[in-house]
Amino acid sequence: MPHSNIAVVLTTVSTQEQANNLAQQLLNERLIACSTVIPAVTSHYWWEGKITSETEAVLLIKTREDCIEQLQKRILELHPYKVPEFIVLKASAVADAYAAWIEEVTTTQKN
C-alpha cells in the first residue's frame, strides 16, 4: 500500500468559482489527478498587522510529488492572492488502485 510519490496540496481562494476554475485549469494541464473543493469555510489569519476573518474555498489537490514544482509555479501564476497558500502533505500510504490512477492521469511538462 505505501506510495511515496503521492501528495495532497492545500490552497485557498476567495470563492467556489475561483476554486473550480483553478482546479479545471490544473486538470487540463494534467498537473493534478483530482481536486476536491470545500466551499465556504471561514479562515482566520494575520494580515498586514491585524487579525482578519474571511470566507474562502479550500482545494484539496491530489497529485504526484514529481509534479509539485510545476504545480507550485502554475498556482502562483494563476492564483488571485498576493500570498497564496501552498502546503504539500506527503502521503505515507495510498490505496494501490488510487495511486495507480493518479500516476496514470498526471504528467510532468517539459519546458
Image (spheres, rainbow, N blue to C red):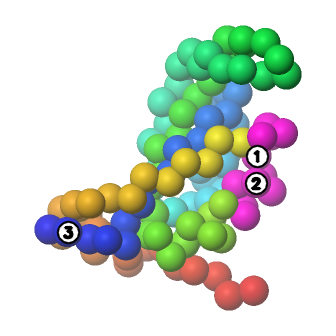
**Mark 2, residue position:** 76
Do residues under tags 1 and 2 come within 8 Å of each other at their CB atoms?
yes
Asked if residue 53 shows in the view, the reply is: yes
Local secondary structure at mark 3: loop
Residue 8's x, y, as percent? Answer: 43, 53
Q: Amino acid at mark 2?
A: Leu
Q: Quadrant of residue 7?
A: bottom left
Name the quarter where the N terminus is drawn. bottom left
Residue 68's x, y, as percent? Answer: 56, 67
Q: How many marks overall?
A: 3
- In the rendered image, residue 99 lying in the magenta stretch gets the answer no
* Residue beneath the point at 59% across and 19% down: 43
Mark 2: few/some/many CA within 10 Å (<14, 14-19, 20+): some
Q: Amino acid at mark 1?
A: His
**Mark 1, residue position:** 79
- In the rendered image, residue 74 lying in the magenta stretch gets the answer yes
Q: Amino acid at mark 3?
A: Pro
